[in-house]
Amino acid sequence: MSRALATTNPKTIQALPSQLDPARMPAHVAVIMDGNGRWAKRRGLPRVMGHREGVEALKRCLRLCSDWGIGALTAYAFSTENWNRPGEEVSFLMTLFERVLARELEALDQEQVRIRFLGDLEPLPSGLRQLISDATARTAANSGIHFNVCTNYGGRAELVHAARRLAERVAQGEIDAASIDEQTFAAELHTAGERDPDLLIRTSGEQRISNFLLWQLAYAELHITDVLWPDFDQQALLAALLDYQGRQRRFGGVDTLPPIPT
Ligand code: IPE
Ligand code: IPE
Ligand code: MG
């Protein structure tokens, strides 16, 4: 991963904590950033203040993942079901995405982050769509962490979209139905080209996946923490990674390496 940013950016790089085994880091971390509303409510603030603070947590998490050599971070920012929220909250979120992207793009690019937005982007406000397309093009060739922001993302919608695309290709005689396998299917998902997440973190204690990466999480290790997303910090990420490194991943087979003693 490029460290060229150290010369162009005064930010210091956080060293990998000594408790973590550098050889057993997840290559791809996915996160369901939940609990913004509750964070705000506990402080007697409007829910949207939790979203604002949630942006700071995401920036912190991205930089730590990048510094610690994690290849990809995929964050759930807005689900296909989140349109059911009150209109003011939805518009606040759309404006927030737009402002944050405009403000942070320069730094993200300098830090070699490759940003992509996964989901059905059509229904998003046109200003946001324009920024997304600029940010994606500008950072496409960057050599650093892959930062995927799931926006108007739904796992079921993604699967239906992939099925429809394959059906169209069969109808056009481009491919043979019998040739469709897991690889050709995965290539039609928004995550095409990205390896599956090794670790899924969900904050705020909810024990569900809420329509997130239904295909890709097939063998992810799950870490659920009571920490509310705006409070998710270095210690919380370290706890998730230590939990991950203590797991035996079997992929349906038998034991491989023993867990690292802590
Ligand atoms: C997650 O926090 C952010 C989004 C879904 C956009 P919530 O807004 O769901 O916070 P809680 O779950 O109500 O506390
Ligand atoms: C999941 O959180 C979606 C995002 C984090 C963007 P929700 O708060 O929408 O999920 P539920 O409603 O608790 O399942
Ligand atoms: Mg929630």
Image: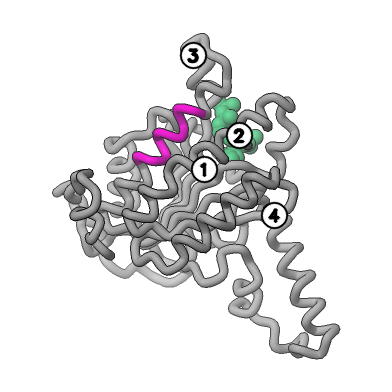
Work out whether 94 lies above or below 126. Answer: above
Q: Residues within 10 Å of mark 2 (few under 14, many from 20)?
A: some
Q: Label for residue 32? A: 1
Return the residue at label 3. Answer: 42
Quadrant in the rendering for residue 57: top left
Residue located at (56% from left, 64% from top): 191
Q: x, y (%) of residue 90? A: 68, 32
The span from disc 3 to disc 1 (Cα, nearest Å) is 20 Å
- In the image, residue 53 lies in the stretch drawn in magenta: yes
Q: Which residues are magenta?
A: 52-60
Return the residue at label 2. Answer: 95
Q: How is the image coloured?
A: one colour
**Label pair 2/4, CB-CB below 8 angstroms:** no
Which residue type carries mark 2? Thr
Residue located at (45% from left, 40% from top): 103
Give whichever of discs 3 and 2 has the lower sequence position: 3
Give whichever of discs 3 and 1 has the lower sequence position: 1
Q: x, y (%) of residue 24? A: 27, 61
Nearer to us of marks 1 and 4 is 4
Secondary structure beneath dot 1 equals strand
Return the residue at label 4. Answer: 120
Q: In the picture, which quadrant includes the N terminus? A: bottom left
The span from disc 1 to disc 2 (Cα, nearest Å) is 20 Å
Q: Left or right? Give the position of 238 relative to 58.
A: left
